[in-house]
């Protein structure tokens, strides 16, 4: 009997230890905005953006539901990539539902419309009651359990290659710049988030020319296992010299049913060297099946949906799985170097 009890106790003690080595990342459906929750083992949580306001607190409720599923009782760091309504609008409603300890942003808004002023003021009313960090390219966020390096912020980007290489990026040849973007999109806080040998690049709604600043003439970011499609998969972003240089195994598209998911951006992802799969939060209704992922890889098929999520579970050695919250579809990925 002692042997049996001892064996059971060992199993019970070992199981949580294995689980505790996994980073969980929830891509929460906020209908074409962004809300991405990072839950490292025994560390501090990070949420990237908070979705839209109003709708009865729909997006705030979805974020809190994902947090509860992950066993999270507070948001230690909320990174607001920029001050558009689909990214910052949900902050006041979220703060009324769950504690937020630290806010990270790029500084003052660059837009001056009535709506922009209202959004920024509503955000400041919440932010100023907590700790605040100004994001600066090249600096790291002090998040326990995650390495988070700021790549872009307030229209600026890192200048030194992260991987120590300064070889010209051949993908830049012949790529044209687009009209300069003076909106909040170009101010986006972009990040390289690393957990052991696993990494994700999330650039918010950074637009084409700013992406080229990271890729041309040199790719200063390096590579990443996962790329979050910039700007929800709009053709205003997703410059091929950057996307292809990242060599992601997986792309996550945080599009809405009628927002983002453009054929141009989708094909840029699909043709990226080494890419295995694209996972989408929504089926893009304005694109055909050739420019959407297979249905098993899409969290929400209908325009009016339940708000299903996509989840990544990553190990320190770089291996990870992606799971569709709608149907339980799970795929495992292993970096080629392993």
Image (spheres, rainbow, N blue to C red):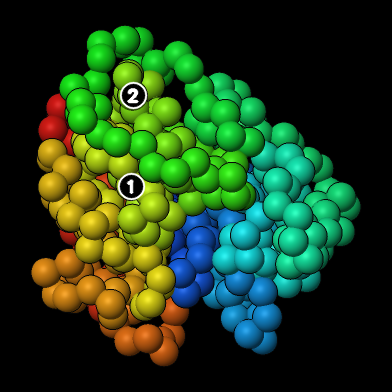
Q: Residue 281 appears at what percent x and percent y?
A: 35, 69
Q: Position of residue 239 (x, y in %)?
A: 31, 42
Q: 80 and 101: which one is in front? A: 80
**Can residue 174 be seen from the camera position used here?**
yes
- Return the residue nearer the eye: 112 or 332: 112
Near mark 1 (Cα within 10 A), the count class, few <14, some 14-19 or many ≥20, is many
201 over 127 or under it: above or below = above
Circle 2 residues within 10 Å: few <14, some 14–19, many ≥20? many
Helix, strand or loop at mark 1: loop
Q: Is residue 143 above or below residue 44?
A: above
| Residue 238 marker | 1
Residue 238 at x, y = what percent?
33, 47
Mark drawn on residue 216: 2
Q: Is residue 160 left or right of residue 293?
A: right
Residue sticking out furthest to the front = 179
Residue at horizontal 22 percent and vertical 37 percent from the top? 244
> Which residue lies at the image location 20% right of the left edge and 69% below the top edge?
292
Q: Nearer the viewer, residue 167 or 75?
A: 167
Residue 57 falls left or right of residue 36: right
């Amino acid at each position: 009997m002692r042997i049996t009890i001892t064996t059971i106790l060992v199993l019970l003690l070992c199981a949580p230890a294995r689980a505790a080595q996994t980073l969980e990342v929830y891509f929460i459906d906020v209908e074409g905005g962004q809300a991405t929750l990072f839950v490292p083992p025994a560390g501090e949580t990070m949420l990237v953006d908070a979705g839209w306001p109003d709708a009865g607190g729909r997006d705030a409720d979805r974020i809190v539901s994902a947090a509860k599923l992950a066993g999270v009782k507070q948001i230690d760091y909320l990174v607001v990539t920029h001050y558009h309504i689909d990214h910052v609008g949900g902050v006041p409603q979220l703060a009324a539902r769950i504690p937020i300890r630290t806010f990270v942003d790029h500084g003052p808004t660059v837009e001056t419309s009535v709506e922009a002023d209202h959004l920024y003021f509503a955000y400041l009313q919440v932010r100023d009651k907590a700790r605040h960090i100004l994001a600066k390219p090249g600096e790291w966020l002090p998040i326990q359990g995650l390495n988070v390096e700021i790549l872009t912020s307030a229209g600026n980007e890192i200048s030194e290659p992260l991987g120590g290489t300064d070889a010209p990026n051949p993908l830049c040849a012949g790529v044209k710049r687009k009209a300069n973007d003076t909106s909040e999109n170009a101010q986006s806080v972009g990040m390289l988030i690393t957990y052991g040998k696993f990494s994700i690049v999330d650039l918010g709604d950074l637009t084409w020319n700013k992406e080229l600043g990271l890729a041309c003439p040199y790719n200063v970011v390096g590579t990443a296992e996962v790329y979050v499609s910039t700007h929800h998969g709009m053709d205003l972003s997703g410059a091929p010299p950057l996307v292809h240089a990242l060599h992601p195994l997986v792309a996550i598209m945080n599009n809405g049913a009628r927002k983002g998911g453009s054929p141009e951006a989708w094909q840029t992802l699909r043709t990226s060297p080494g890419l295995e799969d694209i996972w989408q939060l929504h089926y893009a209704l304005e694109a055909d099946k050739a420019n959407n992922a297979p249905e098993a890889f899409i969290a929400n098929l209908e325009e009016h949906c339940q708000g299903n999520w996509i989840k990544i579970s990553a190990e320190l050695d770089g291996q990870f799985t992606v799971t569709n919250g709608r149907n339980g579809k799970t795929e495992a990925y292993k970096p080629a170097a392993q």
